[in-house]
Image (cartoon, rainbow, N blue to C red):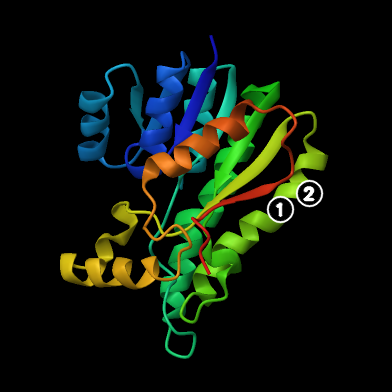
Amino acid sequence: MEKIIVAGGTSGIGLATAKLLAEKGASVIVTGRSEEKLAAARSTAPGITAISLDSTDADALKYFFAQTGHFHHLILTLSSSKGGGPFATINLTDLRAGFDGKFWPHLQTIQAALPWLDKDGSITIITAASSTAKLPGTAGLAAINGALEIMVPILAKELKPLRINAVSPGVIDTDWWNFLNSEEKSAAFESYAQGIAVGRIGNPQDVSNLIETVVHNSYINGSVLNVNGGLM
């Protein structure tokens, strides 16, 4: 049986992906820091193992993977809402926190996982459309996600035959948007939907379907795949 780890998989895209992979017969472990989200994941997806893990803690990561042992696929859905806003006024401490919450935990997790990953397995990084959208107010977010994406084809060559890919979602209705109140979120989604070719905001299942394909298609490697509904 395939063993798959979804780092940061206790909600949103990560949890949707974990559920889909478990339904297809995989043994799935999700990790996260929020005990509330871990408990919710256990109750809504009883076939999934949910483990408390802080991906900013390098020692905790090494211990976790040593205890977990050999596995086949790693999916990273670690996220941070820090780093957005107009460049002229952005708080660089917040941008640094954005890197600390997403960029560095990705690298630490991958390094800690490598000794335990199947050589014919895969690593899938979840980035964001901000890396290429060129929208005002997203320079910081673009820097974080773009930094991860630019590493993908290089890591694919360095770590072969292990496959390394990224999936880049567009505007997806997840907890990431909870920095806005309900009215602000509705207005933002309505505005974004007007610039999306399919005419709607995405949902976690739209992204999890692509992630499952990337994980299991052995001829996808070194690629960044977009799932954004035709975001303009």
Give the x, y percent position of residue 90: 43, 83
Say which amino acid is labelled 1.
Met
Horizontal side of 84 relative to 214 (left or right) equals left
Quarter assignment of residue 173: bottom left
Q: Is residue 77 above or below residue 1?
A: below
> Number of callouts in the render?
2
Looking at this view, name the residue that lies furthest to the top.
Answer: 1
Residue 84, position in %: x, y?
42, 73
Could you tell me which secondary element the residue under label 2 belongs to? helix
**Residue 182: image location, x then y, percent:** 17, 65
Label ID, residue 65: none
Residues packed near mark 1 inside 10 Å, few (<14), some (14 to 19) or many (20 plus): some
Pick whichever, 35 or 46, lies toward us.
46
Amino acid carrying label 2: it is Ile
At horizontal 18% and vertical 67% (from top left) the residue drawn is 181
At horizontal 58% and vertical 65% (from top left) the residue drawn is 131
Q: Hey, which residue is sitting farthest bottom in the picture? A: 88
Q: Is residue 203 visible?
A: yes
Q: Is residue 20 left or right of residue 187?
A: right
Tell me the residue at 76%/41% (across/down): 156
C-alpha gap between disc 1 and disc 2? 5 Å
Q: Are marks 1 and 2 in contact (CB under 8 Å)?
A: yes
Instruction: Determine whether 100 is above or below 120 in the image.
Output: below
Q: Secondary structure at mark 1?
A: helix
* Residue wearing tag 1: 151
Whole-percent x, y for residue 103 in the image: 55, 56
- Say which of 195 and 104 sits in front: 195
The answer to whether residue 53 shows anywhere in this view is no
Choose between 225 and 81: the one closer to the eye: 225
Q: Which residue is mark 2?
A: 154
Q: Nearer the viewer, residue 100 or 138?
A: 138
